[in-house]
Image: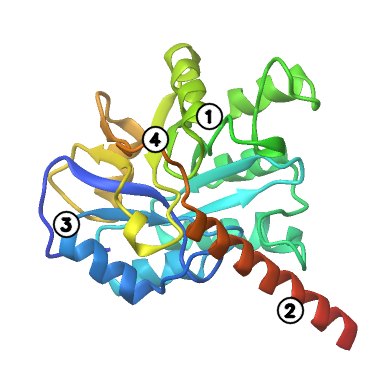
Amino acid sequence: MTHTTIEQANLLVDTHVHSRYSDGTAGVPRIERYCRDRGIGLAVTDHNEIRGAVHLFERERVPAIPGIEVGTEEGVDLLIYFESASLLEEFYIHAVEPFLRTRFMVRSWIQALDCLQAAREMDGYISLAHPFALGRKSLDYQHDRRGKPFVETVMEGVDAIELYNGGVHRQANLRASEYAAVAGKRLTVGSDAHRLRSIGTCGTYLNTSGTTTADLFDALTTHDGMRFKVRTSRAAATLPTLGIIALKHTHHFVRAHARRKRA
């Protein structure tokens, strides 16, 4: 991104947003208008998918960081950000696309440690998404069936943890906050938005006077003392949002199953 009409220090950037290319409801133009009206930036982080992030970057309408949410074989979700769309595309081609599962949107065959290594080799910035969400998405030292060594290795490999996620229950966010106090990691905050009205309800204030992708990436990855915006209500994802997500995943599964039968 080379320019934008938004010029603002301490820019609010929602670092976890889904578009219609995965299980969100809005396309890139609608997301752009919504963010421009509110003076915020974002990272589109679709599940194992980069078309929305690249499209947003190429249009240069709002401050944006190219990103992706990779669902690993073990179930851990990694938010990975890059300084340019070309680096994101290179990472996707080599570390995501060959491992895609046909019928499951949010999971792939790539192992978490291999994903971490590939992202690091391509200068990605990695944040552990919703570290205490339900089931396999959680990394829990005390109860994780994958074993403490696995949890420790993943935690060593990430650059940051998602301090607050707008789509999970408050108890999971409380645990993430408690863990963040002792983890020694940088932090991100994102809404995990799947529809327009959720974008910007949570986010990270980046201390930058510029709004190029390089400016935002630098602020996210190196600046200390960042402030965060979290959802004020106690609710996590609303029932309509959960319904939308379930419907999108069901459609994805059914279409993939139909393609396999035709083949």
Q: CA distance from mark 4 to mark 3?
A: 25 Å
Does residue 125 appear to the left or right of 43 in the view shown? right
- Mark 4: which secondary structure? loop
- Disc 2 element: helix
- Disc on res. 219: none
Q: Residue at x 74, y 70 (%)?
A: 253
Task: Measure the alpha-carbon separation of dots 3 and 2.
Answer: 37 Å
Which of 230/42 is in front? 230
Q: Which mark sits nearer the N-terminus, 4 or 2?
A: 4
Pointer 4 residue: 234
Residue at image position (25%, 58%) is 63
Q: Which mark is first along the chain, 2 or 3?
A: 3
From the image, state whether disc 4 or disc 3 is nearer to you: 4
- Rendered residue at 46%/66% (across/down): 19
Q: Is any part of residue 46 visible from this angle?
A: yes
Q: Earlier in the sequence, mark 1 or mark 2?
A: 1
**Residue holding disc 3:** 39
The label nearer to you, 1 versus 2, is 1
C-alpha distance separating marks 4 and 2: 36 Å
User: What separation in Å lies between label 3 and label 1 (alpha carbons)?
Assistant: 29 Å
What is the three-letter code of the residue carrying label 1? Ala
Which residue has dot 2 on it?
A: 255
Whole-Å distance between the Cαs marked 4 and 1? Answer: 12 Å
Q: Nearer the viewer, residue 24 or 112?
A: 24
- The residue mark sitting in front, 3 or 1, is 1
The residue pinned by badge 1 equals: 172
